[in-house]
Image: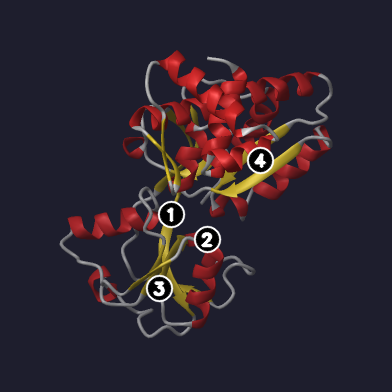
Amino acid sequence: MKDHQLKVFLRIADEGSIRGAARALNLSQSALTRAMRELEANVGAELLIRSYRGVEFTPAGKALLTRARLVMSTLEKARDEIRWLSGGAGTQVSVAVTSAIAATVLPSVLRTFDQEQPDARVILAESMLSTVLPGLMEGRIDFAVAVAETSQLPYEITLEPLAELLSAPLGRVGHPLLQASSWSELAEARWVLNLAAGSSAHYLKSWLNNRSIEMSERIVCCDSSTLMVELMRHTDMIGLAPRFFADNSLSGKGLACFDKLNDFPRFTVGLLKLKGVPLHPGAERLATLFRREISGLSL
């Protein structure tokens, strides 16, 4: 299995066709087809199915795709490590961060990191588990600081607990249900939630179901925390967010917490990374800064 064969394989996946991959790599289609035949011979299985719609991956192709992305990413991380040892120029760190951490320690962490390594490049993403887990497993994300529970994670991902987070339902100031004293009173309300697997709202729905409280089907599904907050501020929709958001003069403007409810169980905020794969020095330094700033943080 050769480096150029994997690059061809991954480019075909990205472009969706051999023709598109050939154009992107500035190679002939026959050269790409030959490289794919050599790769299939090497692994002993058919990887692609060609059709008028482009290409589709066989089960063997899908399995190799994830591993191939990780292999190429690992090689890039080796380059990052060498760049770091040479002063940091060209080093790249990709990290996903939950909104609670973005609103508290992220600015301080980035300021310190920038002072230490002004030439390093940091790529940030929001840490929704639905996108974080594939990103970690394919090597596109170095690590994540996210809300997670070990029982919800695949074997390949490790969780290092850092803090506990109290989430609560929030709504606009003056919301007609603010005085509700039981969760059942909110069950029929209009909600705006991110119900992706592993999300706080996903846990909320399960938690209510375990207490024989069925949440309304009148849910607006949203994967943007910014959109959710604006809908909570300007409509009667109720959302789930870190409790401290309501107390913050900036993020909590126009928002109120349903304080008469029993507290929703706390979540674990932790550092997620790929098991058995060490972080390159730049990523490890950034992770250390997050650990230091989050330690003892009251969320």
Amino acid on which disc 4 is placed: Arg
Residue 217, position in %: x, y?
26, 71
Which residue is disc 3 drawn over?
238
Image position of 245 (left or right of 148) = right
Upstream in sequence: badge 2 or badge 3: 3
Residue 209, position in %: x, y?
20, 59
Task: Determine whether label 4 and label 1 are within 8 Å by CB.
Answer: no
Upstream in sequence: badge 2 or badge 1: 1
Amino acid on which disc 1 is placed: Leu
Upstream in sequence: badge 3 or badge 4: 4
Amino acid on which disc 3 is placed: Ile
Question: Across the whole image, how many numbered discs are drawn on residues?
Answer: 4
Query: Dot 1: within a 10 Å radius of its alpha carbon, few (fewer than 14), some, or many (20 or more) residues?
Result: some
Task: Determine whether label 1 and label 3 are within 8 Å by CB.
Answer: no
Which residue is disc 2 drawn over?
244
Which residue is disc 4 drawn over?
23
Upstream in sequence: badge 1 or badge 3: 1
Upstream in sequence: badge 4 or badge 1: 4
Query: Dot 2: within a 10 Å radius of its alpha carbon, few (fewer than 14), some, or many (20 or more) residues?
Result: some
Who is closer to the viewer here, 223 or 37? 37
Who is closer to the viewer here, 101 or 19? 19
Upstream in sequence: badge 4 or badge 2: 4
Residue 163 makes an appearance in the image: no
Task: Determine whether label 2 and label 1 are within 8 Å by CB.
Answer: yes
Q: Secondary structure at mark 2?
A: helix
